[in-house]
Amino acid sequence: MPVLDGLGTLRKIGERSEWDSVKVVAISASVLEQEHQEFLAAGFGAFIPKPFRSAEICACLARLLGVEYEYAQPAQGRAVPLELEGISLSPELLQHLKNAAELSSVTELEKYLDEMEGLGGSASWLAAHLCALSQDFRMDEVLAILDRIEEQG
């Protein structure tokens, strides 16, 4: 954060009594266990390392807030299986796409999807599909599709 780091932000929140019950989660690319423990000791309710997946965020919220999610049932008859046969991506492009999706970087992902769209044919259609998923922050689905392409490659 450009003006105030996470610890400073937590201190500011702690200064306001009406926010006493607010749960704050630290998210950082730090790999040092000591730093993780410092975040928790400072008062963060949890620590989530980057890159993170939406499932980690949901699990953390459920734990901290004591909530249980109710998931909608998938619509019957609407899902069309993706046909990925014949789609071939260079290992380099595939890795760039996966890295961007794992980091939840929509901007970076879309840069590589533009490159994929330039391949034409079914790769172009799939790039548009992956772009729509990324704009809805459905990176787990993007990664699952990319994994399937990698497996068939």
Image (cartoon, rainbow, N blue to C red):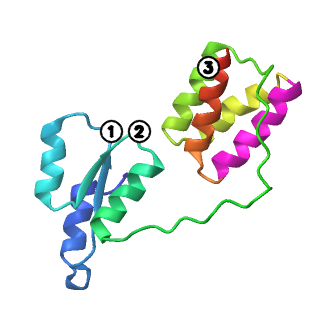
Q: Are marks 2 and 1 in contact (CB under 8 Å)?
A: yes
Q: Is any part of residue 64 visible from this angle? A: yes
Q: Earlier in the sequence, mark 2 or mark 1?
A: 1
Residue 118 location, x and y as percent?
A: 82, 25
Residue 38 location, x and y as percent?
A: 13, 49
Q: Amino acid at mark 2?
A: Pro
Between marks 3 and 1 in the image, the one whose residue lies nearer the viewer: 3
| Residue at x-position 24% and y-position 56% | 46
Which quarter of the rendering shows the C terminus?
A: top right
Q: Residues within 10 Å of mark 3 (few under 14, many from 20)?
A: few
Name the residue furthest right. 121
Left or right of residue 76, residue 41 in this image = left
- Please provide the residue range marked out in magenta: 120-135
Reading the image, the residue beneath label 3 is 151
Answer with the quarter of the image where residue 51 lies: top left
Between marks 2 and 3 in the image, the one whose residue lies nearer the viewer: 3
Q: Compare residues 102 and 105 and report the one nearer the observer.
A: 102
Q: Which mark is residue 29?
A: 1
| Residue at x-position 76% and y-position 50% | 79
What is the secondary structure assignment of the residue under circle 3? helix
Between marks 2 and 1 in the image, the one whose residue lies nearer the viewer: 2
Q: Which mark is residue 51?
A: 2
Q: Amino acid at mark 3?
A: Glu
Answer with the quarter of the image where residue 20 lies: bottom left
Q: CA distance from mark 2 to mark 1?
A: 7 Å
What is the secondary structure assignment of the residue under circle 1? loop
Left or right of residue 119, residue 148 in this image = left
| Above or below, 117 relative to 52 | above
- Asked if residue 91 is among those painted magenta in the image, a careful observer would answer no
| Residue at x-position 19% and y-position 73% | 14
- The secondary structure that most of the magenta stretch takes on is helix
